[in-house]
Image (tube, helix red, strand yellow):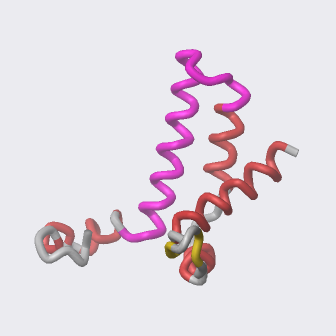
Amino acid sequence: MQDSVVFGSLWSQSSVHALFAEIPRTRAWLEIVAVLAEVQSEFDLIPADSAHAIAACCRSLTVDAALLEEFRAIEGTEGGRNTPKSQGFFDKLKGVWSELTE
């Protein structure tokens, strides 16, 4: 959004720009998913052990420049289309999930 022609000026202050930078934004999304799982468990929408595992997975993934570089390096095609960078993110989460649930 910071690079947006339409909305870029809204995020021009460095303090606001920092909130929407890749690393803190990704960390925040993982925390949202963790809290969502915990709340869903409180309302018996998902099992408590699943909620704990999801939250642990989200909170144990270290989002830093090295991780983002891993995602930037992803190339390839799947079904004739470019593999999205988000696929690398989900693959990484699956790996963390596997380690936590073994």
The spot of residue 84 in percent (x, y) is 51, 69
Q: Which residues are magenta?
A: 21-50
Q: Decide whether the magenta segment is chiefly helix, strand or loop.
A: helix
The spot of residue 86 in percent (x, y) is 52, 64
Q: Is residue 93 above or below residue 51?
A: below
The spot of residue 55 in percent (x, y) is 63, 41
The spot of residue 101 in percent (x, y) is 82, 43
Q: Quadrant of residue 89?
A: bottom right
> 15 or 74: nearer the eye?
74
Task: Identify the residue shown where x is 17% and y is 73%.
Answer: 8
Residue 65 appears in view: no
> 35 or 101: nearer the eye?
101
Does the magenta-highlighted stretch encompass residue 44?
yes
Q: Quadrant of residue 11?
A: bottom left
Residue 92 appears in view: yes
Q: Quadrant of residue 94?
A: bottom right
Task: Identify the residue shown where x is 34% and y is 70%.
Answer: 18
Which residue sits furthest right?
102
Quadrant of image for the C terminus: top right
Does the magenta-highlighted stretch encompass residue 69?
no
